[in-house]
Image (cartoon, rainbow, N blue to C red):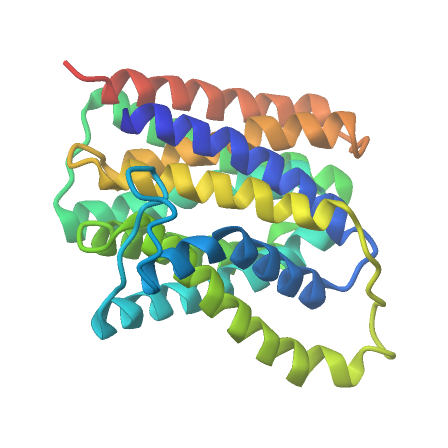
Amino acid sequence: MWLTLAFTSAALLGFYDAAKKKALTGNAVLPVLLLNTLFSTLIFLPAIFSAEFGLGWFDRTVLASAPGTLEAHGMVILKSFIVLTSWVFGYFGMKHLPITIVGPINATRPVMVLVGALLIFGERLNAYQWTGVALALVSLFLLSRSSRREGVVFSHNIWILCVALSAVTGAVSGLYDKYIMTRLDPVFVQSWYNLYQLLMMAVVVGVIWWPRRNRTTPFHWSWAIPLISIFLSMADFAYLYALRDSDAMISVVSMIRRGSVVVSFLCGALLFRERNLRSKAVDLAFILVGMIFLWLGSRPA
């Protein structure tokens, strides 16, 4: 079941990336991110009310939850800060780079999660899974070569650095998710971390963007903004429930989720008319084959 949830999350993340690219094109980054956290909070706000006030609206459903302790809220606040840091870097990188470059870079994030899973949680991969990891590394090398044709030099591009920092903090978030999901309820985590992110982003926008709004990229409304929240909320919901499974391996789940690059690549080709697709398709092929090996190595015996 956790494999199905992981692949479902991956597909939804691809649509999330496409909506994010559309919303950020020629737009101010920070208010878009603020609205993303607002709409995500509104989606799960009924679950918070139901749990905190004992209303029982979602009893015997997947949205059933319970009030959390002070310690639980502390863990969720830390998760909110880590994820928001990753998003800020990732949104700026997404705005200034082709989605067909950002997607494959993010697809290598699980390699860092893998190292952490081996060292912290003692996870062990079989031959199929190791093959999938190796293919993901090859894809990064090929991507760095093909991106030069678009004037994007990995070692001299601040937006590549932003995407890289987003990947690092995202890997930290993945490892932390594995830790807290053995202790907390998925609905409690997702509903409250959205709310805490909204409060944090309100402060960031109020302090950094609002006073300078007339001197920076202006904000304009896009219907892609609520789509970001919808696709992300569904993707995270499937992801957190996958991690609740005692058999789930964060190293494998994280790698599968980066398969979202398949959807984002197709959107980049069909919706955004990005260039140099033939060489990038080779990079994508390595990732796809890697996903197949990960699936083969993670199936129940």
From the viewer's perspective, is 9 left or right of 189? right
Residue 89 spot, x, y in % from top left: 57, 62
From the viewer's perspective, is 61 left or right of 26? left
Residue 251 spot, x, y in % from top left: 28, 39
Count every numbered label the image shows and give the total: 0
Using the image, determine if residue 214 lies above or below residue 223: below
From the viewer's perspective, is 134 left or right of 145? left
Quadrant position of residue 283: top right
**Closer to the camera in the image, 173 or 195:** 195
**Closer to the camera in the image, 136 or 110:** 110
Quadrant position of residue 31: bottom right
Residue 200 spot, x, y in % from top left: 52, 74
Using the image, determine if residue 59 lies above or below residue 275: below
Using the image, determine if residue 135 lies above or below residue 120: above
Visible residue check, residue 2? yes
Q: Residue at x 77, y 46 (%)?
A: 223
Q: Residue at x 47, y 39 (%)?
A: 235
Q: Residue at x 35, y 69 (%)?
A: 78
Q: What quarter of the picture does the C terminus occupy?
A: top left
Q: What quarter of the picture does the N terminus occupy?
A: top left
**Closer to the camera in the image, 294 or 301:** 301
Q: Farthest front residue?
A: 55
Residue 88 spot, x, y in % from top left: 58, 64
Visible residue check, residue 108? no
Q: Residue at x 64, y 29 (%)?
A: 265
